[in-house]
Amino acid sequence: MRKIFKNASIVDVVNQRIFEGWFSVKDGVFEFVEEGKYGDDLDGEIVDLKGEQVLPVLIDSHMHIESSMVTPYRFSQAVLKHGTGVVLQDPHEMANLFGLMGVVFMIENSKNQPLKILTAIPSCVPASRRKLETPNSRITVEDVEVLSNFNGVVALGELMDYNGVLDGNDELMEIIEFANRKGLKIEGHCPTLRKMRLSKYLGYGVRSDHTLTNPEKIEEQLRKGMYVMIQMKSLTRENVEYIMSLKDRSRILLVTDDLPPSILLDGHLNLLIDRAISLGWDPLDAMASATLRPAVYLGLDRYGIIAPGKSADFFTVSDLKRIVPDEVYVKGERLLNLQFHPTRFREIFDKSIELRKFKKEDFRIDISDGSHEVRVITMNDENSLTDITVERLYFKSGFANLNGKDIVQVNVFRRRNSEPIGGVGFLKGLNLKDGAFATSFSHDNHNIVIVGKDPEQMAKAGNMILKGGMAFVSKDERILLELPIGGILSDEPVEKVGTKMRKIEDALRRNGVSHTNPILFLTVLALTVSPKYKVSDLGLIDTVNAKVMDLFLK
């Protein structure tokens, strides 16, 4: 059955122009795409777009579905209505918990969704090979071989353990060599690599980087042949001005990386386009970085533009100044008519946390009474970049007196020990006045992270999430977001999950936290490849030099 869409304003992301015209769709594919008025030349159902702008669906070429804290089924429902039609997922969160079976779960539940979901095989599970944490699972070269045979697997996920790559770690070398032999695209993660160290890293076949960036870093990476992925935290006026000065922007891509469900309530990749435009990025060029350019990067010949022979995946908007889809079509069918496939096999990932109930004493530190010099992580309000300073703290009976100080205690407990075993650190700059936050969702290892000043509140928050979830406890309130699947996912609609997460974010802000994305920041506090200092179950981590540090000065 042919459909003819007339009176359309078609966005041409190749020539970066908009033309008045019409197009037809047959068998899920664009048939004719023509400039000018439709002349009643064809038989078929007529759809009058009444001048609406028509764009190809957005393509997110680097992201993690698990960061939305919902299953692929619920994620697909959430993002298609925002205009995203294709994603490349790297399911390294489920991989870090359940290895091969966690990745298979994500692939199987991504099949046959109206959202086209491609997969990158997680490469660094655990995140670092330098024993900076106790792994909950591993991905081996044998696992990579198995996963490479699944339909829709097109890449090797981000090589986060860049120190391991540069060290020539045997496991990583085997994985990289297989990926190159198989012809998989290799994704990068190199927040601090420059000059010869970057060149050596790229020599293994790495094509891209999505980490926090600046003009100097963008220039070197483009010069060395990389695709530069710009996520929300890198959308600064300085970066946008530099990008617009480039003669060739074909290797500049917009990606979401990690978007929590609270943000998905408002949008997905379209939010990045809006932000880019507000900072001075030419609107049609920004759209090219979320459609045509990622299609080329991923080798998707039938996506990225509105043209004959391409898959008829598109959406309409009334105003290009703010990308809010009015209608979304997949293979020419309206979103309302599409069938989503419910989640399967979720039961095998329940009950993944083995900890007994927390007690106040679990937050005690083995240190003598008195004043001690402590290495304290410092943070900013904009992103996850941290530094370190030295503070003098007073301890009594193993508990730090944090009253009157902008310092909180951070505990990371192994989720698969019945007795709470883990590492501890201190964090400055969170501005938390009252309350404790606990989460079983914690990039990438997903051990239990608990943050607060009062050990009794910290114990209460921890006890709320022993079946999986995220919680905030204060003198006046208790809020719980349940994440029963592996302790990191829900199969509830994003609207429900995102609303509950917003309640936790609002509670954090009411109690003083001023970070732009407080939960996103708190869930990377234990990420041992995120610069510069974090906390794992082994203690305070220098992530740049990949080593465990002493918490106390000698």
Image (spheres, grey):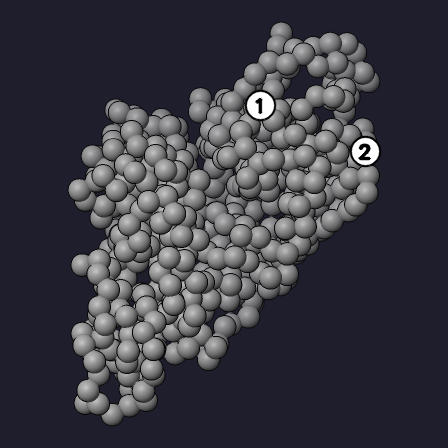
| Label total for image | 2
Residue 515's quadrant in the figure? top right
Would you say 14 lies left or right of 78 here? left
User: Residue drawn 40% across and 44% down?
Assistant: 231
Amino acid type of the residue that numbered disc 2 sits on in the rendered structure: Glu
Residue 393 vertical placement versus 498 (above, below): above
Mark 2 crowdedness (10 Å alpha carbons): few <14, some 14-19, many ≥20: some
In the rendered image, is residue 415 in sight? no
Residue at the outermost bottom position: 43
Residue at the outermost top position: 554
> As rendered, which of 394 and 132 lies closer to the eye?
394
Amino acid type of the residue that numbered disc 1 sits on in the rendered structure: Ile
Residue 50 vertical placement versus 184 (above, below): below
Question: What quarter of the picture does the C terminus occupy?
Answer: top right
User: Residue drawn 51% across and 27% down?
Assistant: 386
Q: Position of residue 433 (x, y in %)?
A: 72, 31
For disc 2, the marked residue is: 456
User: Residue drawn 64% across and 51% down?
Assistant: 501
Element type where label 2 sits in the image: helix
> As rendered, which of 99 and 480 lies closer to the eye?
480
Question: What quarter of the picture does the N terminus occupy?
Answer: bottom left
In the rendered image, is residue 400 in sight? yes
Q: Could you say which disc has been placed on residue 65 in the image?
A: none
Mark 1 crowdedness (10 Å alpha carbons): few <14, some 14-19, many ≥20: many
Would you say 390 lies left or right of 467 here? left
Q: Position of residue 252 (x, y in %)?
A: 28, 45
Q: Position of residue 82 (x, y in %)?
A: 45, 63
Residue 337 vertical placement versus 292 (above, below): below
For disc 1, the marked residue is: 377
